[in-house]
Image (tube, rainbow, N blue to C red):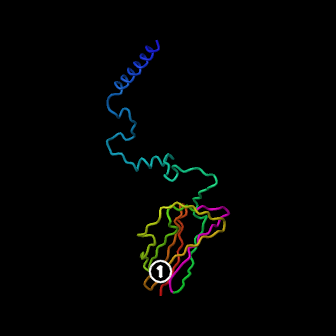
Amino acid sequence: MKKSVTWLGIGILIMGGILIVILYKGDSDDMVSNDNEDDTEFNIEEYRKKLKEKGQLISKEKVNQKFNPKKIINKNINNVQLQLEEISENGSKKFNLIVENITEDTQILHFGTSQRYDYEIYNRDNELVYHYSEGKSFLQVIEEIELKPEERLNYEITIPTLDPGEYTLVASLVAKHYGGQRQIIQFKVN
């Protein structure tokens, strides 16, 4: 009795599968919903734009992140202040890039490589004459630095040998969420 009921169930499943195939045989367009009715190519950028507008696109930085309530990622670059001060010594031009937490909360600086800052030097005609990170490789090291309220970090920038003249130094921090802030200072080389 159990065997016949089992075989009857298997038969019904097979017949149902065959019936579904027969009913839906034809164009695959009938089975797939497509907003694009004509034969134009699928544009992935337009599709991503639509998803982003609907709030359904998740940025890659949010994928596979572990939740840690003690760690707050603050996306406000105004929570840290950058300063440049000249510290020339022995004829070479040097600057300190000072990163200061100006809030009452601890700021967490996220770095994806061993690079902590970047800078560019422009001549009097606003032509780029030197870019610190160009042509360099940095270690692929993920590091987080906690910056307590009013705490400072100092990064020494040594200017390469330049022809005499007036220059502009543009320095920035490369920490995630803080890289949009730049500090600018003009200097002379004699």
Q: Quick check: 51 above or below 101?
A: above
For label 1, the crowd category at 10 Å Cα-Cα, with few meaning under 14, some 14 to 19 and many 20 or more, is many
Q: Quick check: 12 above or below 104?
A: above
Residue occupying the point 62% across, 70% down: 152
Residue occupying the point 32% across, 32% down: 27
Residue 123 appears at what percent x and percent y? 44, 79
Q: Which residues are magenta?
A: 91-108
Seen from this angle, which residue lies furthest bottom? 190
Residue 20 appears at what percent x and percent y? 38, 25
Q: Amino acid at mark 1?
A: Tyr
Q: Nearer the viewer, residue 17 or 178?
A: 17
Seen from this angle, which residue lies furthest right? 104
* Residue 150 magenta-highlighted: no
Residue picked out by circle 1: 167
Residue 129 appears at what percent x and percent y? 42, 77
Q: Quadrant of residue 34?
A: top left
